[in-house]
Image: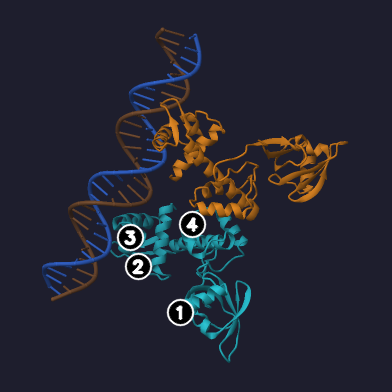
Chain colours: A orange, B cyan, C blue, D brown
DNA sequence: ACAAATATTTAGTTTTGTCTAAATTTATTT
DNA sequence: AAATAAATTTAGACAAAACTAAATATTTGT
């Protein structure tokens, strides 16, 4: 797999949104900032290699082989993102570019060891799930903290209420997007709950909980 | 700088051995496992970019710009090697291939943070010096432990006596190539010394010390 | 110093991945 | 169901980085 081939496979995967969708030449060209004719050329090559199903004028979809290839790239990308944030102290929103490069490094041993070193994380700093070595992975959904049951664990990914007051509250309590949050216990009376945020325990009101979005893995 | 250009610059740097030497087309071709005609082509391009001094039929040398570029690649290569050995638990002799890929990742911020994370190491797992951000670096030399003064610190890189008995001794005492060794104190009477090996203190005889090679930074 | 050997460069191709412009197919409108 | 619009493919070109084969320079041996 060349670097360029990997980029196409990954783009087709993302445009498919997990589904077995047929993706148009133009959609790929737009996404990759290239020309439709270039896409056609590359699609033919990927089709030769049995990475995509292709019927002229009808668009492409990934084969099983293509899907597994895409997942292995996604796995590498997200593991590197965890490394950059957890170990090198990058902010969660400045890792994408570098991870785009690192995801192309070829060494199974490296990825295995990196995975172990990071503690076999299930999600990246954006809350997106990390596929396992053999291409399995859970989907993730974005929910308000208030909607989740006790025991749920996820990554803070957004706010409902972006008023100055609420953002100040988050800041004062050292809650940032990208942080890991776990619901420890909920008080039925007022809906307040105690949570673990980056391993630190604290208590938040229902108002707070219904304004903070968490990305959590689906049960299955 | 393309990947290929970086590889040529690095090769010319290594063939120059730190000197301002003129390197032949054939030497580069041999080293890079490519054809002399390809080398000529690339040299012309690098010459256009002021990375090398080139006179037809006379060979090439790096310009100051080229030298700094080479040093930045070497710096990245060696920092990644430290990462692979210290953090991911690779053996010192299996890191080269992966580091060859990682050295081409483009992000100054990444290298700065990696350097900090690793504790600003001065040498890689082979005992070779890591250039600083601005291209300064000390040379290293290979010496027998017995020849070095108290206080010296370096990396174990080889043995003089490769008898089974000696290798067994090293193994039993958990001394491996790639380990960091510091001379703490020497007994004048018998030449025995106490050393720190991977931060563990132990005592070795003169026989041992005169059979173990250390790569140490030169004083200057 | 000159012929032979060796090293280097030039000229012309190849492959990969891209592009433009033209041709063709599919979709949309009326 | 044509006509028009939009999407897609084809054909031909180009740049980067490699190659082969031929031409040219340099070095070496006598």
Residue tagged by mark 1? B161
Q: What element does badge 3 sit on?
A: helix
Work out how far the residue at label 2 is from the one at label 1, CA to CA, in angstroms.
Answer: 37 Å
User: How would you rate the neighbour count of disc 4 (Cα within 10 Å): few for under 14, some for 14-19, many for 20 or more?
Assistant: some
Work out how far the residue at label 3 is from the one at label 1, CA to CA, in angstroms.
Answer: 36 Å
Return the disc, 2 or 1, that comes first in the chain's sequence. Answer: 2
Q: What element does badge 1 sit on?
A: loop
In the image, farthest residue toward the bottom:
B189
Residue tagged by mark 2? B22
Q: Which mark is residue A185?
A: none
User: How would you rate the neighbour count of disc 1 (Cα within 10 Å): few for under 14, some for 14-19, many for 20 or more?
Assistant: some
Work out how far the residue at label 2 is from the one at label 3, CA to CA, in angstroms.
Answer: 14 Å
Callout 4: residue from which chain?
A: B
Whether residue B205 is situated above or below residue A78 in the rendered picture: below
Quarter containing the C terminus of chain A: top right
Q: What element does badge 2 sit on?
A: loop
User: How would you rate the neighbour count of disc 2 (Cα within 10 Å): few for under 14, some for 14-19, many for 20 or more?
Assistant: some
The verdict on a common chain for dots 4 and 2 is: yes
Residue placed at 43% from the left, 70% from the top?
B18
The verdict on a common chain for dots 3 and 1 is: yes
Please indicate, yes or no, whether residue A215 appears anywhere in the rendered image: yes
Return the disc, 3 or 1, that comes first in the chain's sequence. Answer: 3
The verdict on a common chain for dots 2 and 3 is: yes
Residue tagged by mark 4? B98
Does the residue at mark 3 contact the one at mark 1 (Cβ under 8 Å)?
A: no
Residue A4 is situated, as x and y percent measured from the top left of the image, at: 45, 42
Callout 3: residue from which chain?
A: B
Work out how far the residue at label 4 is from the one at label 2, CA to CA, in angstroms.
Answer: 30 Å
Please indicate, yes or no, whether residue B62 appears anywhere in the rendered image: no
């Amino acid at each position: 797999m060349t670097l360029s081939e990997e980029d196409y496979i990954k783009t087709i995967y993302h445009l498919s949104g997990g589904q077995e969708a047929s993706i148009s030449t133009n959609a790929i060209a737009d996404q990759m900032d290239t020309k439709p004719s270039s896409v056609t050329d590359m699609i033919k090559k990927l089709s030769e290699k049995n990475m995509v199903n292709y019927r002229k004028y009808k668009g492409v979809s990934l084969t099983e082989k293509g899907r597994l290839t895409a997942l292995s790239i996604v796995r590498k990308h997200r593991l590197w993102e965890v490394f950059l944030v957890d170990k090198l102290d990058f902010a969660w929103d400045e890792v994408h570019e570098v991870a785009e490069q690192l995801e192309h490094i070829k060494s199974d041993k490296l990825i295995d060891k990196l995975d172990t070193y990071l503690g076999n994380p299930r999600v990246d700093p954006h809350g997106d799930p990390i596929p396992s070595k053999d291409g399995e992975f859970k989907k993730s959904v974005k929910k308000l903290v208030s909607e989740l049951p006790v025991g749920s664990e996820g990554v803070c990914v957004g706010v409902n209420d972006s008023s100055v007051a609420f953002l100040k509250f988050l800041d004062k309590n050292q809650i940032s997007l990208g942080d890991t949050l776990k619901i420890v216990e909920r008080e039925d009376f007022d809906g307040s709950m105690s949570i673990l945020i980056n391993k630190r325990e604290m208590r938040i009101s229902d108002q707070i909980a219904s304004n903070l979005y968490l990305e959590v893995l689906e049960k299955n």
